[in-house]
Image (cartoon, grey):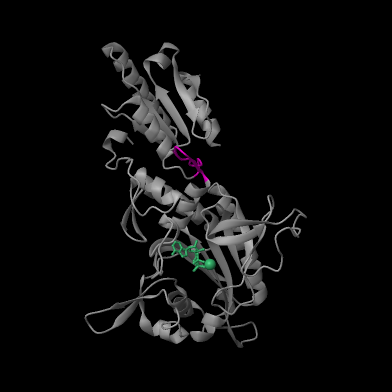
Amino acid sequence: MRQSRLFTHTSKNVPTDADSVNAKLLTQAGFVHQEMAGVYSWLPLGLRVLHKVENIIRDELDKLGAQEILMSALQPKENWDTTGRWDSVDVLFKIPSQTGKVYGLGPTHEEIVTPLVKTFLNSYKDLPIAVYQIQSKFRDELRAKSGVLRGREFGMKDLYSFHASTEDLDTYYSKVLETYLTIFSRCGLNAKVVEASGGSFSKKFSHEFQVLTPAGEDKILTSETGTFAQNTEIATLKEGDKNPENGEKLELKTGIEVGNIFDLGTKFSDAFDVAFTDEKGERKTAVMGCYGIGTTRLVGTIVEASHDDKGMIWPVSVAPFHVHLVGLKSKDAAVQSRIDSTAKEMYDGLWSEGVEVLWDDREGVSPGEKFADADLIGLPLRLVVSEKTLKEDSVEWKARNESAAKLVKTQDVIEQIKGMMK
Ligand code: ATP
Ligand code: MG
């Protein structure tokens, strides 16, 4: 993409209510635009990150045999009456219709997925069933805050699984837990698994996935390495105790909850009478698990976990583009034409190799401004073509997460980038 064509611009203005690093940087770099408190539009650069995060999730869940669907965001009140949650879920938006009916605007989808799966479930041979969706969720949060970390409209991946036995659910649950760690690590994050109390569901167990950053809302007991952690709200251990996983000292940290998994038991399948015929011909109730990841929160979490005073630092796997190619100006027309043709060749050559390039081809923008924008936007690699680099048949190569720049021969650039992306 040519940056001169990008309809968004960077801005030095800090949003007045930007109470967090992610809100400030994502807005200044033109990744998102706040429409009102807790509600954001996703712009070209931000949407590319969000899509990459979503596709990592799809890739990993498809490996688990889960099937992607898309359920309705507008939900019938009757279903919420069936589970008794119409009045008890305080964040549920209730939408009156001119027909006199009232609808729920989906904060979660147990009330839709459970009767949906019931429609197709007859025999134990149909089980297990695992379906997921990636969709906007709506929650009437009392306080929207921390940019995209806690919104009233936000992206979520929600997966629901149905099983013939608790043993089968337990096995699947463990697999999802492992898969979640893979997803977060592919997004460049180190997530800790927290044993949680389980919120409003009456269940055996649930786990949260916490990324430790100062921006987090939750207080977590954990140690440097390993995945073990406890939320202080429920902790049986205390600061200074030994981590049962590896013997290290437990410290108090703040974390952002990026995912949550629950053993639902038969709470929802009882409510909607989701039964199947077992091997002996007897009717049995299916057991369920549900598994969420906040996709938009995940993008904000990556920013919180990976930035410096100049801007964001995207991991290759979710960066909006891999390379920021910057062409500088020369007063000499012949040199200028060589700079332009070298940059154009590099741009085309990289794209043809699957390397995604944002080319800063803007006229009338100073080198200082171009570099500041590149740092703010935070693509993993910056390449600069200038009069100086052309003298060496080279381009200047600077990784966003390193301070030193070096010259790399123009002809070697593509091979070296392919190495970086492995
Ligand atoms: P939290 O404890 O942060 O309020 P939750 O326990 O209510 O979240 P779930 O209902 O399990 O969350 O939702 C699944 C995931 O969706 C969460 O782990 C989180 O990553 C994300 N999420 C939940 N609420 C919000 C929100 N208001 N804004 C953005 N993401 C959210
Ligand atoms: Mg929670």
Quadrant location of the N terminus? top left
Kindly identify the residue that appears in the image at 54 percent across and 60 percent down.
257
The picture quadrant where one finds residue 375 is: top left
Count of all numbered marks drawn on residues in the image:
0
User: Would residue 68 be counted in the magenta stretch?
Assistant: no
Q: In this view, does 342 lie above or below 95?
A: above
Question: What predominant SS class does the magenta segment belong to?
Answer: loop
Q: Is residue 105 above or below residue 341?
A: below
Give residue 394's position: percent from left, percent from top: 45, 17
Lateral position of residue 269 relative to residue 250, left or right? left
Q: Closer to the camera, 214 or 7?
A: 214
Lateral position of residue 226 relative to residue 257, left or right? right
Give residue 128's position: percent from left, percent from top: 58, 71
- State whether residue 64 appears in this view: no
Give residue 405's position: percent from left, percent from top: 50, 24
- State whether residue 333 appears in this view: yes
Kindly identify the residue that appears in the image at 26 percent across and 13 percent down.
333
Q: Is residue 264 above or below residue 351?
A: below
The picture quadrant where one finds residue 85 is: bottom left
Kindly identify the residue that appears in the image at 48 percent across and 65 percent down.
158
Lateral position of residue 65 relative to residue 2, left or right? right
Residue range highlighted in magenta: 306-317
Quadrant location of the C terminus? top right
Outermost residue, left side: 98
Give residue 353's position: percent from left, percent from top: 44, 32
